[in-house]
């Protein structure tokens, strides 16, 4: 009887599992298989070859990977520093005001990313909103701020702000106030409480927020295209160029696989180290 | 008897099959259906509305692509079952789509008379609208335009830009004063010409080295890179840059029509391809080799030859371009002075004279590698 019930669970999960495999895993398998096809073929019925992975190393694609990961890391660290105090206030200090901030941040997500970035282009460009006002009212002539690496990181910070903020709020709200008070009663300094109580207990939120931001920023392209004027070429750009102008699907697939493998391993490593059940509110 | 378990199994199987089936194909007759994959313009209501009115009850859909290879990828990925017409630049139809069986010939007897009404360059019919053998008509031509580079004539005179050609971008004084419009398959051709190479002939190792040096110099001196022509024109108008590599009537016309006539497409006076240095694109609209074809595909190609529709296609949203049918006085009568000025009608004949057709670059793959390496260096 027990066995039948066990099997019922398995069988009930089967349709959804099959659907998930088809939707999530099948496209990845296609990309993986394409990545070991010879360059410039449009089907998978060829002798496998690792030529595309060789090209990654010999033609300097690692530089674009480096820029993508480096700028994603910079954006993640900046976001953590900016969001932590706000998240702390939202979780512990603000009462109804938290809701207002939440709505204000969420509303920005209703406008497409490209449109918001174009807004920044118009604001930051030479003769744009800022430099135009400065010229008219203060007589100061300045160049625009676009087309460099810092403005790309700024774009990433701006676009992925909510993805760091909300997990942090969730993580910080998991830190019991009694534990902080107990530590304080026992004579711990504020710094010590921060490093030994706040940070470790909010870690699931910090890891989820950082991971979301990093993964999204590493695959982002619009910021470097629109704000950065491609001052540096990022990996997502290389993948797009290989699939389109290069008409080299297999090289594009190999570049995509390398990005997926790096980000995937990072995600597995990070998630295996935190108690995700805690942040999902299932802590027993 | 169907119990819950078999029902669930069935659901999974159906879901699986649905996901595997790929793009949907209609099994009913497709006499009243037309799907067009095109550059922006053909997908506007100004073009599709009158066609729909002419074919009441028909379902006409058009989607605009963002690049030739993007659209071709759709057909390669199996969407030949979905689309009926595809509108791409001239070499793709003849050199890739037709040999790979993704498009099929048109009824030559039905369409050949229309070529006689076109500008002289396109009569005969236009060679790149035919297959390699010259027997089959593989598409109709309408929009076209010279495409080399664009300058702000308040900063760089037209005369000087035409005389210097692409060397303008190699001048140390231009460092940090221009942008690169990243229509990569175009830039490769023009960078070859900047290096005094003919991109349409096979190149040798020393040529590749020359190309690489020029590509690096051009990227190195560029202030910005973007594939957004509006962003590029904005930078040109607000003075961030004084020129951009590459561009032409297609990219300059929206700014010109907006009154910014200092933005001007330039065709070099000379170059390494039989003395010519300009490149002209011509859109070829072809019938997709859809296994379930619709008669509306050829009807649409005939419909867009009408003078009113020619004008609408030339001045549809986004960019403004000359059309091959402008030889017809009835078409010309529909353009006013500002519109003709936007598409640089005054210099079009001489620019066409100095330009060669956009063709397949023989060593594209190798040059593309060198181009991308230069771009990221």
Image: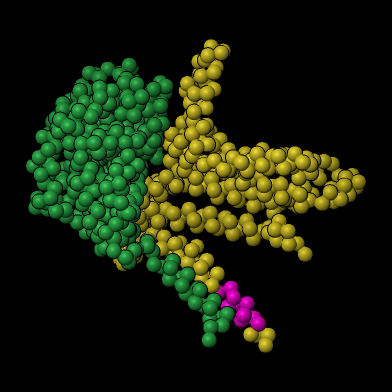
Chain colours: A yellow, B green
- Where residue A145 appears, x then y in whole percent? 51, 27
Asked whether, in this view, residue A32 is left or right of residue A112, the answer is left
Asked whether, in this view, residue A155 is left or right of residue B221, the answer is right
Q: Residue at x 29, y 43 (%)?
A: B50
Residue most extreme to the top = A139
Judge whether residue B241 can be spotted in this image.
Answer: no
Residue numbers of the magenta segment = A5-14
Residue most extreme to the right = A185
Using the image as rendered, state which of residue A267 and residue A240 is in the foreground. Answer: A240
Q: Residue at x 17, y 36 (%)?
A: B325
Asked whether, in this view, residue B181 is left or right of residue A206, the answer is left
Q: Residue at x 22, y 56 (%)?
A: B295
| Residue A12 among magenta residues | yes
Question: Which secondary structure class fits the magenta region best?
Answer: helix
- Where residue A115 appears, x then y in whole percent? 50, 37
Judge whether residue A178 can be spotted in this image.
Answer: yes
Above or below, comparing residue A140 to residue B68 in the picture: above
Quarter of the image where one finds residue B184:
top left
Using the image as rendered, state which of residue A188 and residue A133 is in the foreground. Answer: A133
Using the image as rendered, state which of residue B355 and residue B60 is in the foreground. Answer: B60
Q: Residue at x 44, y 38 (%)?
A: A225
- Where residue B66 appears, x then y in whole percent? 35, 44
- Where residue A12 appears, x then y in whole percent? 59, 75
| Residue A81 among magenta residues | no
């Amino acid at each position: 009887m027990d066995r039948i019930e066990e099997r019922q669970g398995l069988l009930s999960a089967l349709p959804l599992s099959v659907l998930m495999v088809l939707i999530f895993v099948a496209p990845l398998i296609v990309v993986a298989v394409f990545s070991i096809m010879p360059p410039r073929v449009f089907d998978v019925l060829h002798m496998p070859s690792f030529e595309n992975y060789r090209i990654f190393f010999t033609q300097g694609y690692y530089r674009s990977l480096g820029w993508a990961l480096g700028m994603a890391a910079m954006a993640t660290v900046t976001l953590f520093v900016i969001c932590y105090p706000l998240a702390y206030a939202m979780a512990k200090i603000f009462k109804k005001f938290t809701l207002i901030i939440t709505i204000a941040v969420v509303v920005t997500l209703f406008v497409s990313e490209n449109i918001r970035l174009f807004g920044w282009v118009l604001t930051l460009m030479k003769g744009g909103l800022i430099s135009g006002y400065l010229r008219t009212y203060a007589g100061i002539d300045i160049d625009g701020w676009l087309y460099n690496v810092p403005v790309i990181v700024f774009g990433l910070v701006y676009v992925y702000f909510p993805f760091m903020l909300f997990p942090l709020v969730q993580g910080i709200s998991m830190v019991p106030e009694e534990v902080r008070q107990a530590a304080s009663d026992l004579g711990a300094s504020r710094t010590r409480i921060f490093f030994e109580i706040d940070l470790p207990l909010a870690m699931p939120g910090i890891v989820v927020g950082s991971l979301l931001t990093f993964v999204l920023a590493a695959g982002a392209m619009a910021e470097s295209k629109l704000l950065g004027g491609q001052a540096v070429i990022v990996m997502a750009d290389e993948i797009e160029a290989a699939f389109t102008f290069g008409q080299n699907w297999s090289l594009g697939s190999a570049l995509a696989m390398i990005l997926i493998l790096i980000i995937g391993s990072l995600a597995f490593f990070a998630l295996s180290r935190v108690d995700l059940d805690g942040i999902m509110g299932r802590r027993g | 008897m169907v119990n819950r378990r078999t029902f669930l199994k069935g659901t999974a199987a159906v879901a699986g099959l649905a996901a595997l089936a790929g793009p949907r194909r209609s099994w009913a007759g497709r006499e009243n259906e037309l799907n067009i994959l095109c550059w922006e313009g053909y997908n506007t209501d100004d073009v599709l509305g009158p066609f729909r009115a002419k074919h009441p009850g028909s379902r006409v859909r058009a989607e605009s692509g963002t690049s030739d290879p993007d659209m071709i990828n759709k057909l390669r990925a199996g969407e030949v079952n979905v689309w009926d017409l595809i509108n791409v630049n001239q070499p793709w139809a003849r050199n890739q789509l037709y040999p790979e069986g993704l498009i099929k010939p048109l009824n030559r007897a039905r369409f050949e008379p229309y070529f006689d009404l076109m500008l002289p360059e396109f009569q005969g019919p236009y060679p790149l609208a035919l297959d390699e053998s010259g027997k089959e008509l593989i598409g109709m031509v309408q929009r076209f335009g010279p495409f080399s580079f664009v300058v702000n004539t308040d900063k760089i005179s037209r005369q000087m830009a035409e005389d210097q050609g692409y060397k303008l971008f190699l001048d140390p004084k231009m460092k940090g004063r221009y942008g690169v419009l990243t229509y990569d398959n175009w830039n490769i051709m023009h960078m070859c010409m900047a290096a005094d190479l003919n991109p349409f002939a096979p190149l040798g190792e020393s040529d590749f080295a020359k190309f690489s040096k020029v590509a690096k110099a051009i990227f190195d001196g560029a202030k910005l890179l973007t594939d957004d022509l509006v962003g590029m024109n904005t930078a040109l108008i607000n003075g961030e840059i004084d020129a951009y590599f590459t561009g032409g009537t297609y990219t300059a016309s929206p700014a010109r029509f907006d009154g910014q006539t200092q933005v001007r497409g330039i065709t070099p006076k000379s170059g390494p391809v039989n003395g010519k240095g300009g490149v002209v694109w011509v859109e070829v609209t072809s019938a997709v080799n859809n296994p379930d074809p619709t008669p509306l595909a050829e009807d649409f190609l005939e419909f867009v030859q009408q003078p009113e529709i020619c004008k609408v296609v030339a001045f549809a949203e986004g960019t403004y371009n000359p059309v091959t049918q402008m030889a017809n006085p009835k078409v010309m009568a529909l353009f006013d002075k500002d519109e003709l000025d936007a598409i640089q009608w005054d210099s079009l004949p001489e620019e066409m004279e100095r330009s060669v057709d956009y063709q397949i670059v023989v060593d594209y793959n190798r040059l593309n590698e060198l181009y991308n390496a230069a771009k990221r260096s």
